[in-house]
């Protein structure tokens, strides 16, 4: 199968590596030097422009959220009827309508979100959320034939609300590192187990490009809801009130198990 990967960033590179072991893969990126760098490492063909692409059976869009609609529209005008366009953005509300319009041109659209980062060593151990474009069953079947990771169907709002909280995590961890930066020496000296593991998680988020973290919150229509609720708890500073509202998490994760894990890793 001939597959076009649009975007040679971290996720585009990850999928190019996996797909090129099984299919004929071409890669396009506005930054041609990145594509050439990828070609030196993988069995992929560089594509200099998105013009003559009617021969491709499928395209995988791995570009920033704000760029997805325009890229999808461009692919929709130039790919042949019967082909497939997939996109992997982490917020679906801004892109879903562009994906659904592909059907008017006889092109199948598939919207999924890898729930893992480019550091995943084996795709078979990962998971991906799948948001229906037109026919969820057919879309999941196609993805299953292409990728080995577990597929989790999610509603559009359900998914984006979950990702709004992920965006908040990125904001919290980065803000903590920024505001405590001048106290890094003291925190390192007096690092408790909790501080130590929180810092590891916080520092790990710095491996994600800041523009991606920014888009994760700027393009999510539900982020302000999450931020409002979180700030309300922060301002209360009332641990009894805050803990009194925690119920469903305790049905999923036992504090004793989490505490034991913290010390056993």
Image (cartoon, grey):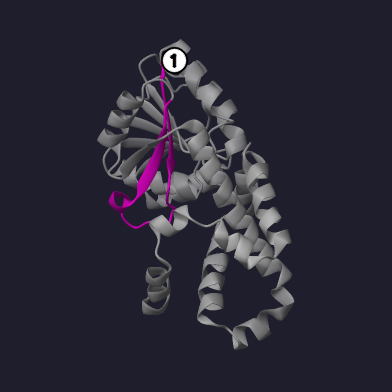
Mark 1 closeness class: few <14, some 14–19, many ≥20 residues within 10 Å: some
Residue visible at 63% across and 36% down in the picture: 221
The residue located at (48%, 50%) in the rendering is 10
Residue behind mark 1: 103
The reply to whether residue 51 is in sight is: no
Does 207 sit above or below residue 16? below
At a point 70% along the width and 65% down the height, the residue shown is: 237
| Quadrant for the C terminus in the image | bottom left
Q: Dot 1 lies on which element? A: helix
- Range shown magenta: 107-132
Residue 217 versus residue 34: which sits nearer the camera?
A: 217
- Residue 230 location, x and y as percent? 65, 54
Q: x and y percent of residue 4 in the render?
A: 41, 32
Number of labels in the image equals 1
In depth, the one of 135 and 232 nearer the eye is 232
| Residue 218 visible (yes or no) | yes
Percent coordinates x, y for residue 249 in the rendering: 46, 56
What is the x, y in percent for residue 19?
A: 32, 41
The reply, left or right, for residue 224 in relation to residue 135 is: right
């Amino acid at each position: 199968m001939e597959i076009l990967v649009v975007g040679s960033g971290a996720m585009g590179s990850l999928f190019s590596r996996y797909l090129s072991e099984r299919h004929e893969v071409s890669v396009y990126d506005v930054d041609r030097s990145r594509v050439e760098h990828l070609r030196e490492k993988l069995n992929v063909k560089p594509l200099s422009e998105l013009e003559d692409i009617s021969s491709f059976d499928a395209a995988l869009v791995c570009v920033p959220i704000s760029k997805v609609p325009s890229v999808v529209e461009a692919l929709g005008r130039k790919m042949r009827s019967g082909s497939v366009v997939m996109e992997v953005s982490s917020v679906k509300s801004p892109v879903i309508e562009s994906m659904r319009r592909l059907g008017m041109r006889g092109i199948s659209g598939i919207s999924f979100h890898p729930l893992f980062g480019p550091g995943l060593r084996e795709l078979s151990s990962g998971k991906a959320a799948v948001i229906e474009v037109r026919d969820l069953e057919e879309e999941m079947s196609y993805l299953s034939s292409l990728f080995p990771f577990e597929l989790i169907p999610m509603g559009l709002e359900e998914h984006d609300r979950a990702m709004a909280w992920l965006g908040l995590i990125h904001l919290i961890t980065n803000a903590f590192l920024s505001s405590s930066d001048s106290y890094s020496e003291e925190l390192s000296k007096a690092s408790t187990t909790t501080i130590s593991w929180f810092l590891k998680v916080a520092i790990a988020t710095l491996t994600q490009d800041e523009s991606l973290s920014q888009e994760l919150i700027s393009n999510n229509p539900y982020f302000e809801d999450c931020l409002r609720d979180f700030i309300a708890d922060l301002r209360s500073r009332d641990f009894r009130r805050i803990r009194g509202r925690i119920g469903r998490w305790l049905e999923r994760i036992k504090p004793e198990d989490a505490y034991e894990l913290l010390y056993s890793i």
